[in-house]
Image: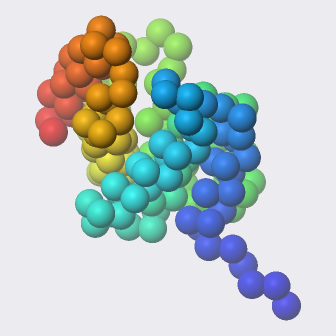
Amino acid sequence: MRERKSMIDTAKDIASGAHEGQVDKLGAAYIGHPARVAGHARDLGGSPEAIAAAWLHDVIEDCDVSAADLRAAGLPDTVIVAVELLSKRPGQSLEEYCAGVRGNALALLVKEADLADNTDPERTIQLDQATRQRLAEKYQRTRSLLGL
């Protein structure tokens, strides 16, 4: 009899498939970002649900994956709701986005982990000065709106 895959492994597999071929601002495989965010979520004391949501935090916004796909994969609603909240919708203001994330403890922990990776000096130092400055201002505003 086959052993059932863990929720985290399921999330990791979905994210790996969804982000296949994508690269980040530095030209590295994009899947490194959700992997690092999942590690930060774990380090922040995140539950297995938080770690799964961290793996998936960009798949609805940036890939051809829907909440229905996540549900069909057997992921719990707590994870799916957090991933939906972490997915900025077209026309949604940063204030609206942050209010939704702030109202869900799981989404807030994952966003804190996401911001930790996005502002990691070892990575941001590799960006040009103008991009570093623009992103620093954006992420500081996001932190403020989230109460972090």
Name the residue rendered at 40%, 59% in the picture.
39
Name the residue rendered at 60%, 31% in the picture.
23
Q: Is residue 148 visible?
A: yes
Name the residue rendered at 47%, 9% in the picture.
91
Residue 15 position within the rendered picture, expressed as x and y whole percent measured from the top left: 63, 48
Determine whether 99 is above or below 73 in the image. above
Determine whether 68 is above or below 4 in the image. above
Residue 65 position within the rendered picture, expressed as x and y whole percent measured from the top left: 69, 37
Quadrant placement of the N terminus? bottom right
Quadrant placement of the C terminus? top left
Name the residue rendered at 69%, 74% in the picture.
5
Residue 107 position within the rendered picture, expressed as x and y whole percent measured from the top left: 37, 45
Residue 147 position within the rendered picture, expressed as x and y whole percent measured from the top left: 14, 35
Q: Is residue 129 left or right of residue 70?
A: left
Q: Is residue 117 left or right of residue 83?
A: left
Residue 6 position by quadrant: bottom right
Residue 72 position by quadrant: bottom right
Determine whether 16 is above or below 51 in the image. above
Q: Is residue 65 visible?
A: no
Number of numbered markers: 0
| Direction right: furthest residue | 1
Which of 75/140 is in front?
140
| Direction bottom: furthest residue | 1
Q: Is residue 125 left or right of residue 57?
A: left
Which of 119/5 is in front?
119
User: Coloring scheme of the render?
Assistant: rainbow
Residue 97 position by quadrant: top left
